[in-house]
Amino acid sequence: MKWLDRFSERSARSVARQSSRRGFIARVGTMILGGAAIPLLPVARASNNRPDAPAESGDPRSCDYWRYCAIDGFLCDCCGGTYNSCPPGTTVSPITWIGTCTNPVDGKDYIISYNDCCGKSSCGRCLCNRNEGDKPVYQPPLSNDINWCAGSSVDTPYNCSTAVVLGLAVAES
């Protein structure tokens, strides 16, 4: 058993020579702060879990279509895409603005994500500028006055905008 005592003593002295209490406290503090910062990391908001499609009525090529209550731009439905997909040759911007629109068919409010399609020059057809619920630029996620293609990894030209239903808007009490 003497060999175990000598081994333990040598190991403890070696660790003591190579570290200090301050270094230990600094490492523990770094781990605590690092763990606390994890919720601050960016999160991919896009998901494949789409809600059930709401009942639709109206013309997606018309600015009066219910999903377009907070849109500002050219409608992708007139530019080779649809109200929820980009035209060929463009990519959806990874950052968006949102709005809440009332569906006239069921009377429910839905959260709509307005996604800019980027990579080709401006479509130029079916311009729609409705600003219901638009907030000033100091609240960027709710503002439709920003070129959201600037956050894209592709070329930044704006082409058109889509209106994707994210889910049912539920009022918190």
Image: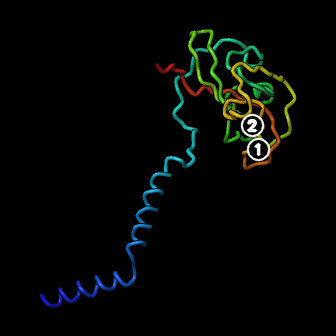
> Tag 1's secondary structure?
helix
> Which of the two labelled residues, at mark 2 and mark 1, occupies the earlier sequence position?
2
Q: Is residue 3 visible?
A: yes
In terms of image quadrants, where is residue 135?
top right
User: Would you name the residue on which mark 2 appears?
Assistant: 117
**x and y percent of residue 25 in the render?**
40, 67
Determine whether the residue tagged by mark 2 lies in a helix, strand or loop: strand
Residue at the image position 60 percent from the left and 25 percent from the top: 165
Q: How many numbered discs, if any?
A: 2
Q: Amino acid at mark 1?
A: Ala
Q: Which residue is mark 1?
A: 150
The image shows residue 107, relative to residue 143, as above or below, that is above
Circle 2 residues within 10 Å: few <14, some 14–19, many ≥20: many
Question: x, y percentage for residue 20?
Answer: 39, 77
Cβ atoms under marks 2 and 1 closer than 8 Å: no
- The residue sitting at 62% across, 14% down in the picture is 102
On the picture, is 157 further left or further right than 37?
right
**Vertical side of 51 occupied by 148: above or below:** below
Give the quarter of the figure containing the N terminus.
bottom left
Taking depth in this image into account, of 108 and 92 the one nearest to the observer is: 108
